[in-house]
Image (cartoon, grey):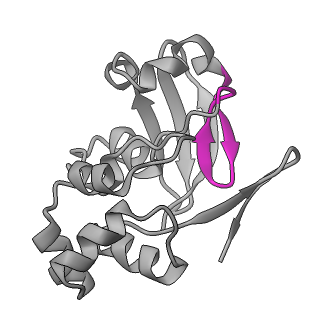
Amino acid sequence: MIHVKSVEHDGDFRLRLKFSDGTGGLADLAKLVAKKPVSAVRECFDRAGLVAGAVEWPNGEVIATETLYALAHGLPRARALEDVVLRSELVDLKELRRQAGMTIAQVSDSAQMDAGEISRFERRKDHRVSTLRRYVEALGGQLEICVVTSAARMRIG
C-alpha cells in the first residue's frame, strides 16, 4: 500500500506530494474541494499536514491516498472503494458498499458469505474484526484500524 511521504501547499488548491514508491507530483484538488463533503477543507487547505502516511487537515478531513496519487500522476480516478473520500465520521456499511458500486450478491460471492449474512452484517452495530476485514476486502479495500490520541494517530495491526 502506498503512503504519502511529504506534502506541501503549492498555491490555490494544489498539493505537491511525494509517495512511498519514490514518485511524486502536483495534485490539483480544485474540483474535488468544490464538492461536499470535501468542501470543508477550503478554509484550511493551505494547512494540510501528514498524519500516519495520509494527508489530513486541521478540521480532521482526510482524502484517500489513492485519489491523491491518481491526481498527482494524471491517472484516471477509479470509480471504486478507494475513490471514496474518507471522513472522521462513522460510515454505514451499506453506504460503503453502494459507493464501491457493488451489490449484495457481488460482495457475498467475493467474501464467500451468503447474501442474507451480508444483509444482516450491514445492519449490525458490532462487528468482529476478521469479518469486517473480509467484507472490506470483498469491496476491494483494505481495513486499517487507527488509534487516535491527543499526541498521535497510529495504525494497529
In this view, the residue in front, 13 or 57, is 57
Q: Is residue 127 magenta?
A: no
Image: 154 above or below 5: below
Residue drawn 56% across the image and 47% down it: 18
Residue 86 in the image: state x and y as whole percent.
46, 44
Please indicate whether residue 85 sits to the left or right of residue 94 in the image: right
Most extreme residue toward the right, as rendered?
Answer: 151
Q: In this picture, is 121 found above or below 82?
A: below
In x, y percent, where is residue 30?
38, 18
**Quarter of the image where one finds residue 58:** top right
Q: How many marks?
A: 0
Q: Nearer the viewer, residue 124 or 70?
A: 124
**Residue 8: percent from the left, percent from the top?**
63, 31
The residue that appears at 34% across and 54% down in the rendered structure is 82
Residue at 51 percent across and 40 percent down: it is 87
Residue at (44%, 18%) from the top-left corner? 39
- Give left or right: position of 10 versus 33: right
Q: Position of residue 147 (x, y in %)?
A: 73, 59
Q: Is residue 131 left or right of residue 78?
A: right
Magenta residues span: 47-59
Q: Please, which residue is most extreme toward the bottom here? A: 112
Q: Quadrant of the C terminus?
A: bottom right
Q: Quadrant of residue 156?
A: bottom right
Residue 12 or 87: which is nearer the viewer? 87
